Amino acid sequence: MFRFLFPRLTPAEPRNTALFSAAVAESRKPFWYADLGVPDTLDGRFSVLATVCAFVAVRLERGDESAQQAGAGLVERFVESMDHEHRQLGYGDPTLGKIVRKLTGALSARVDRVRAVVNAGSGWNEEAAEGLNGVIASAAAGDALKSLWQRLEASPDGRVVGGEWA
């Protein structure tokens, strides 16, 4: 009701909420931590979330125009989330910008590496070691990333944009 009365004073719903929520849900699956050995710490959780977001972003950039826009929206939501979470941790404006730029750079580096792995069809184990904090290059970790990619690739654009993949 207040949004109708005061549209400029109430914040709009964030874009791509379902898509980002699905990436967060994927990154919170115990499999990443219990089976693959990613540490269940802030750094470990960040590494899984950033890796999942990178795979989703690469998948969406291969889709139609609306999928590509959703991929850009996913990255925006990632940055907003990192800003919000680090404010909750007590970081203030002087240092927050540096931290968020560093985290955004980490996501960008993952996107570049994922794009290269997907295009080559190989290097899954190495990407797991590079992208997942605390994980050594192993067939299990590489298979987990390859499986994530196959699930994303098998899903139509609309389902991925809606936060649903096989």
Image (cartoon, helix red, strand yellow):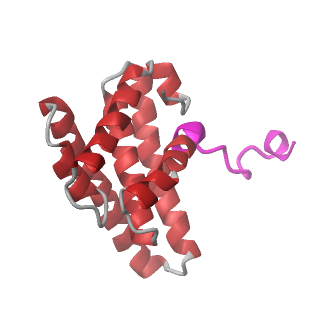
Q: Position of residue 110 (x, y in %)?
A: 26, 50
What secondary structure characterizes most of the magenta part? Answer: loop
Location of residue 144 (image quadrant):
top left
Up-down: is 163 above or below 101? above
In-image side of 67 versus 107 (left or right): right
Q: Nearer the viewer, residue 131 or 71?
A: 131
State the image coordinates of residue 31 (x, y, percent, origin top left): 46, 52
Residues drawn in magenta: 1-20
Question: Which residue in the rendered view is the most extreme toward the right?
Answer: 1
- Tag count: 0
At 29% from the left and 49% from the top, the residue drawn is 141
Q: Is residue 128 found left or right of 90 in the rendered image? A: left
Residue at 46% x, 40% y: name it: 73
Is residue 12 rendered magenta in the image?
yes
- Residue 4 part of the magenta segment: yes
Question: Residue 54: in sight, yes or no?
Answer: yes
Q: Is residue 110 left or right of residue 75?
A: left
Say above or below: 134 vs 117: below
Residue 25 versus residue 148 in the image, above or below:
below
Residue 82 coordinates in the image, percent (x, y): 47, 62
> Can residue 15 be seen at all in this image of the molecule?
no
- Look at the image and tell me in which quarter the N terminus lies: top right
Q: Nearer the viewer, residue 105 or 48?
A: 48
Percent from the top left, x then y, of residue 137? 19, 55
- Quarter of the image for residue 111 reads top left
Query: Which residue is found at the position 50% from the left and 20% from the top?
Result: 158
